[in-house]
Image (cartoon, grey):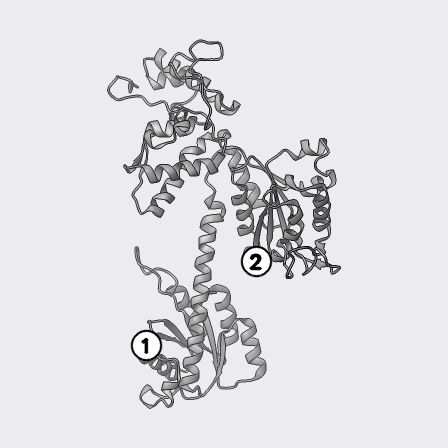
Amino acid sequence: MTPPPERPTERAGAAEGPGPAPERTRILVVDDDPIAAESLAEFLQADGYDAASALDGEEALAMLDAAARPPGAGEAARPFAIVICDVSMPRTGGIATLRRMVKEHPATVVVMLTGYGTIESAVESVRLGASDYLTKPVVDTELRFALERARRQHALLAENQSLKSQLDDRFGPQSIVGTDHRMVKVFDLIEAVAPSKTTVLMTGESGVGKSLVAHAIHRQSPRRDKPYVELACGSIPETLLESELFGHVRGSFTGAHADKIGKFLAADGGTIFLDEINSASPGMQLKLLRVLQERRFEPVGSNTTVEVDVRVVLASNQALEQMVAEGKFRQDLYYRINVVKIELPSLRERTSDIPALASHFLRKNGADLGRALVGFSAEAMGALVRYSWPGNVRELQNVIERASVLSRSPTIGVQDLPQHVVENTAPGLTLSPRGPDGGSADDDDSPWTPTALEAALMEPERRIILKALKANNYNRQKTADDLRINRTTLYKKMKLLGIVLGEDDGRLAG
């Protein structure tokens, strides 16, 4: 076995290296020679690293596994950042160990070390994922530089993993809040369609979360490490949309002072999300049809055909079937994009999700503001549930952000909500307090307000439950029996509809 690097007291040219490690980076030395392994580990300890040693590949992999796990409750794991691995070892050789380390511990950087270096083995090691390949005897300066490069690579890998985790938290399926059966169906479709290349068409009103679903499809797909590109077609003037999508060459039109890469090429290998596809002109629809069929196009002003491998997700906030019937959308393009359709419900169709969504946004705003925001009063939650939400989830998010900023209490009260939400009106509408027949809207003197059909249907249900409660002297078990629902369902409906019974009026009987 070739001797280890010189001892720290004898190092020549130490001033030429990058200097000692500024922090205790963990390094694992793997060598079947115990003297060489221990000597190199001591060398690294003296140089400022936290070093340990293993005598073969199996022991090294076991130590990597153990280091990646937290030692106890409330304690953080301390994984090895770098492995220095000998190529020639019995049982599990260095190359086989490298393969497994790259697969099982992708954030750990591996430096290969051998006394029998060849070009072929060096190329093979780097091809398999090693960051460096050193031959023995190792000059300490060379080792320092190799470790410095490995430290930087590990920092980049850790940053990349952190960014991926943030993207998963923000755009993964777990970031989409909802337990309504319609949303459960959406989750199932995301999981089913994500692994494929199939074109996906999403429909739904503005603000229902189409962009979030498109991100989730990408994050769940094999393309998750490739580009994700998004474009709202309706926000781009028709004259510039083709250039935005397919790029252009210099001089192709006035203002084209340089070549430009379009969104399709920028998304090559990944996913492109085209929102508001219903706004595309007939000419642009024809160009999109060709791209979807052939995955090729020509940039504006160019005769060169560009081929791309891209997964396409589209969305429309209008009914494309009706647009096809009216001749406003190409039938052949509609059939081409309508492979898998995901219909996103409006918020007023999934009112049972409003409490969870509101709490989700409140926690996020509390963290952003550095405040402890703990929840909503019953009256505030009732107002949120009864409101018709023409702006859907986006409007709810904005309302909760406003309330989070204005509230002086940890609990959001009805006074913190916009007046139009409290009165269940669209902003700017003046409502009559009378019903459509000129009489009282209902027995409990609630003002009648013109809402969307789905929201309006909540009011009759609320009146029925209130009448049943009154008839049964507010005994909820008897009320549930009369309504032929179980008591738990009654509780949920009362919470959903904002029916709150006071403790001091005898209404908690049963």
- Residue farthest toward the left in the current orientation of the protein: 504
Residue shown at the point (46%, 9%) measured from the top left:
438
Q: Is residue 26 left or right of residue 185?
A: left
Nearest to the eye among marks 2 and 1: give it.
2
Question: In the rendered view, would you say 462 is above or below 98?
Answer: above
Residue nearest the viewer, comparing 31 with 268: 268
Residue 365 falls in image quadrant: top left
Most extreme residue toward the right is 303
On the image, which quarter does residue 226 sit in?
Answer: bottom right
Tell me which label, 2 or 1, sits earlier in the chain.
1
Mark 2 in CB contact with mark 1 (< 8 angstroms): no
Q: Label 1: which residue?
A: 48
Instruction: Say what secondary structure mark 2 lies in.
Output: loop
User: In which quadrant is the C terminus drawn?
Assistant: top left
Whether 304 is drawn above or below 273: the answer is below
Which quarter of the figure is the N terminus placed in? bottom left
Q: Where is residue 415 in the image (x, y as percent from the top left)?
A: 32, 30
Give the labeled residue for mark 2.
Answer: 226
Q: Which is more toward the observer, 305 or 43?
A: 305
Name above or below for residue 338 compared with residue 124.
above
Local packing at callout 2 (Cα closer than 10 Å; few below 14, some 14-19, many 20+) is some
